Amino acid sequence: MMPLALFLCLSLCPLLCLGQDSTELWLLAPGQKLRLQQSIKQYQQISTDQWHTFPGTLLLRPGDTSSFVPRLRQNLILVGDLDEGQYDRKHLYSPSLALAVARFQARHALKPDSIIGPRTVAALNVPLSQRLLQLQNSLSRWTAFSQDIAQPYIIINIPDYTLRLIDHNTVLLEMHTIVGKPALPTYVNRTDLHTIVFNPYWYIPNSIASKEILPLLKRNPGYLASRDMELFRLTALVGYAKTDPWSVNWTKVTSADFNFRIVQVTGEHNELGKVKFLFHTKVSQYLHDTKDKHLFALDKRAFSHGCIRLQHPEALAHYLMQERSGLSENKIDRFLNTAKPEQFIRLKKPVPLLIVYMTAWADQQLGIQFREDIYGYDKPVQVSME
């Protein structure tokens, strides 16, 4: 077996980074708190009448001329993406301005192509009051969650769709995530990750089984077998007993009286993939692999029922087994390649896990990153005067 660092470096996509130089150390508490405080003061000093908005149909490419260019230039100077001393022809979308637009785009998780299109216009049109609220809320959340963090720790920022593993003040591991859809959100949590499960079964929650799978069974009871799923029926004598789905009259079953349990066993269709990670939580949410790897290429990834899907779970499992349970490379290799179902590893040293909701933070270059408020947690609070 190869050493951990080499395993991580060779097995994962470019997003996963080793070393301090190429990663965003926004996670380190003291500097993050100070930078957010500074940014709040900066945004408080910007007058709302200095900020320009743009028509949704605007399309600008470098080299174009437009009457909107001076307004764009002023916005980018106000937020620090363009130096005030840089000046070009009044209406020319110049190279220096294009570079500033690319910086703005990168800070808002947009493709840094310098093209002013619908998504960039939408980011430019967010009111300064909303940006200030994002900064204030993120500071409050970070202050609450970051007290006395012991390293190593794992942090998942829901609106950023990322997981980062921090050890020795370095972002050792970084990967994309898929989080809960707005109707079924992933919950924030400060907890400990304590167990790895290889080749897990998926014990499908009743809400999913009764509302999403039941309609499929009404049309075709063979659906379960085609998805490596097994049906269990609640009985008075033995509890849940395995049942043939063809023996059930599904036309008479409703979501309200769904007295069944559906389990998806290990296999190519398993929604949890090859590994899941358990942590202390009051709700049925965990980290896990997925068979739908193509979804990680999308910019917006709020698709799950609340659990967090990981782009590279095998790398996290490798680190945890080596560094937190002291397993040898041979044992790690056996677990990573096992075909046995439901193989549990309880970590000797659980790892702190932070699941946070921050739509604003300071990156390593001290720029402020903003993300979409996917759950609406940053909406201004409307106070009734009655």
Image (tube, rainbow, N blue to C red):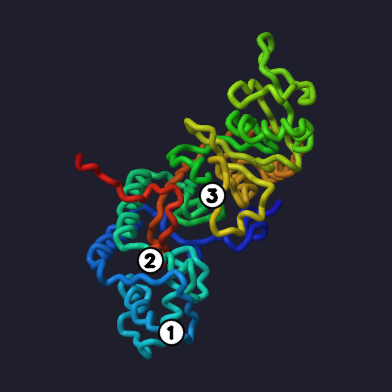
Query: What amino acid does circle 3 point to?
Result: Ala
The numbered mark, 2 or 3, whose residue comes first in the sequence reads: 2
Give the CA separation, mark 1 to mark 2.
19 Å
Q: Report the residue at 51% width, 37% height from top.
A: 350
Residue 384: x and y in percent read: 24, 42
In this image, 131 relative to 340: left or right? Answer: left
Q: Quadrant of residue 39?
A: bottom left
Q: Residue furthest bottom?
A: 89
Q: Which residue is mark 1?
A: 93
Q: Report the residue at 45% width, 85% height from top.
A: 95
Residue 231: x and y in percent read: 72, 26
Give the CA separation, mark 3 to mark 1.
35 Å
Q: Which residue is mark 3?
A: 302
Q: Which residue is mark 2?
A: 125
Q: Residue furthest left?
A: 386
Q: Report the residue at 50% width, 32% height from top.
A: 283
Task: Mark 3 and mark 1 in contact? Answer it, CB < 8 Å.
Answer: no
Q: Is residue 349 visible?
A: no
Mark 3 lies on a secondary structure that is: strand
Residue 49: x and y in percent read: 25, 69
